[in-house]
Structure formats: C-alpha cells, structure tokens
C-alpha cells in the first residue's frame, strides 16, 4: 500500500459542487485533493444542451464539466481518478479508504457525491438493462434511429429525455401515472408541440417484453392505474426517467439524513451533523437540484471548510 495522502480538505465527488469547491478551496490556499468518484463530472456528463447555466445561452453538459475540471486544476486543485469506499468519521483527521488502496487523511471533508438515476425495480427491467432498457437518453439514444421507444416518468428528467430522443426515434411514447406532468412549463410546452411524442396518461410500466436470443426489447406491458387493465405496446427501447436518489452510501449510517436519504445540513449552511464534514449539491439538495445551485453550495462548503480549519488551528 502506498503512503497515505494527507490534505487539509478532501473533496469527494466531481460535479458542479465538487469542482466549484475545488476552485474556492484552492484560492483559499488549502491545497485540496478532489477524488472524482465513479462518474467523473456527475450527471451533467449524461445531458446534452444546458440552457440555464449563467453566461452560456446553450452549452453541452460534458463540455461544461470539462471546463469546470480545467478551472479547478488551474487554481491548484489536485484531481484524482479514484473512488472513496469508506470514511472513518470517529475522529479527526478523517481517514478515507479508496478503491485504489490509497488512504486519504483529511482535516475537513466536502461531500459532493451527487445523485444517481432511480429504477422501478422490475425483474424484467433488470434483465434488459443495457439491452434495450436505459436511464440515459444521451448515452443510448443514438442506437434507436428510426425506432419506436418509450419513456417512463413525468418530471423534468422524463420530458427532457423524451424531447432529446425525438432526434433519433420515429415515435416516443411518454408513460405517466397521472394526467399532469411535474416538469417545468417551458419543457411541457415543447413536449406537447412535438408531433413525435405521444403521452399515455394514467399508466405505469408493468413489464418489459423482449427476446432472449439475442437479448433485446420488443415491447412493454403497461397497466392502467385505475382499472388495472393491461395492454402491450411494441417498442425497441425503454428509458426509465423517474428521477434520482442521493448517492449517500458512504454516509447514510453516520450523518443525519431526511427526505429519502438526502444529507441534512444546518440552516443556511453546508455543515452536516459531524463537525468538519460539509455536504453540497444533489447529495443534500432535495428541492432545487440544479447545476447552478450545486455550484453555489460547493462555494459555500469551501468557504465554511476554510473557516472551520482556521478556527480549529
């Protein structure tokens, strides 16, 4: 095993919150180390057009994350492609184990692990994951040129995925449990104006249908939420877009959480229930879940970590 890596501030996660924390912690001369985690760049690497990032009328999600990473590096943040697997919160400095075997020792920690796509939990969904079932339209939409596909959900994620998929698919059926979408009005307007999209109200996915040899989706069975009546719809792809859950595996048994696993922070702060540990971005934000608010919290976390370390010395 290599010698432990010692740092004043360890940033865990590499979305807008993590990279912004890296910029601010570097400017505070804290010489931070940022460990990118399982998905460098976070959720924005699986989106295309971002229209609500201040200063950019439109920017590609992956391009924005490349720029943010480069900014953090330019400020002096050390960025490492590794995955933190456990944290000892019982004493300071905190000791973190990693997938590579490297041990990271930090006086303060900024958690920015974000959130991950939710799944329905159907056996048939699991069976066809990667073979016609996906949670990422920008990753897999290209494979469905000229095909009919289905999107499951009714929030921003579902509407954005459906709209994006019309670039490839001949038809997109949006399956939603109710008859009203939760998505932002501007997104709803775009969806209802798009002739390739057909909403199917008061239905939920009951089963993914497909072949075994070769493994692939041939359709879906949907169930009416009121009557229980089922019907089959032929599709080649199914995109599950029912939102995200906080990636809290490292901390869920130690830090205080609420609202389905989001880390609790003190009012108007990124401080968690453990002194010296700060949380920013979608790991703690169950309300806004925007790139710009995540970046703002990354800034707050770095400033609060700086103040904490100054007072602790």
Image (cartoon, rainbow, N blue to C red):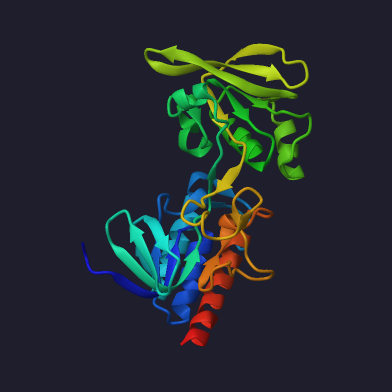
Left-right relation of 201 to 81: right
**Identity of the residue drawn at 51% across and 55% down:** 253
For the N terminus, the image quarter is: bottom left
The image shows a total of numbered marks equal to 0
Where residue 288 sits: x, y (%)?
68, 55
- In the displayed structure, 114 sits above or below 165; it is below
**Residue 128 in sight:** no
Where residue 179 sits: x, y (%)?
78, 29
* Frontmost residue, 147 versus 208: 208
Residue found at the very far left of the displayed protein: 1
- In the displayed structure, 169 sits above or below 2; it is above
**Identity of the residue drawn at 47% across and 33% down:** 140
Left-right relation of 253 to 29: right
Residue 72: image quadrant is bottom left
- In the displayed structure, 210 sits above or below 179; it is above
**Identity of the residue drawn at 50% across and 75% down:** 24
Left-right relation of 50 to 155: left
**Residue 280 in sight:** yes
Where residue 251 sits: x, y (%)?
50, 57
Where residue 240 sits: x, y (%)?
57, 32
- In the displayed structure, 248 sits above or below 67; it is above
């Amino acid at each position: 095993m290599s010698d432990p890596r010692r740092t004043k501030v360890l940033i865990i996660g590499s979305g807008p919150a993590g990279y912004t924390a890296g910029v601010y912690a570097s400017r505070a001369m804290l010489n931070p180390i940022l460990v990118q985690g399982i998905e460098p760049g976070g959720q924005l690497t699986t989106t295309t057009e971002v229209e609500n990032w201040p200063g950019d009328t439109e920017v590609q999600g992956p391009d924005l994350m490349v720029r943010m990473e480069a900014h953090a590096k330019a400020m002096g943040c050390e960025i490492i492609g590794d995955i933190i697997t456990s944290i000892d919160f019982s004493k300071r400095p905190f000791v973190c184990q990693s997938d590579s075997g490297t041990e990271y020792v930090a006086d303060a920690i900024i958690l920015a692990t974000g959130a991950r796509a939710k799944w329905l939990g159907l056996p048939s969904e699991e069976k066809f994951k990667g073979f016609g079932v996906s949670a990422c339209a920008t990753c897999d939409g290209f494979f469905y040129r000229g095909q009919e596909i289905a999107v499951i959900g009714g929030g921003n994620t579902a509407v954005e995925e459906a709209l994006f998929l019309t670039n490839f698919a001949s038809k997109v059926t949006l399956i939603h449990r109710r008859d009203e979408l939760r998505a932002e009005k501007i997104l709803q307007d775009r969806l209802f104006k798009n002739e390739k999209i057909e909403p199917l109200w008061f239905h939920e996915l009951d089963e993914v249908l497909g072949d075994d040899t070769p493994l692939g989706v041939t359709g879906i069975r949907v169930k009416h939420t009121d009557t229980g009546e089922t019907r089959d719809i032929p599709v080649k792809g199914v995109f599950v877009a029912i939102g995200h859950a906080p990636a809290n595996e490292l901390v869920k048994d130690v830090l205080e959480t609420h609202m389905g696993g989001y880390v609790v922070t003190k009012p108007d702060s990124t401080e968690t229930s453990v002194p010296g540990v700060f949380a920013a971005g979608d790991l703690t934000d169950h309300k806004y879940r925007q790139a710009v608010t995540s970046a703002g919290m990354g800034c707050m976390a770095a400033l609060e970590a700086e103040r904490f370390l100054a007072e602790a010395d």
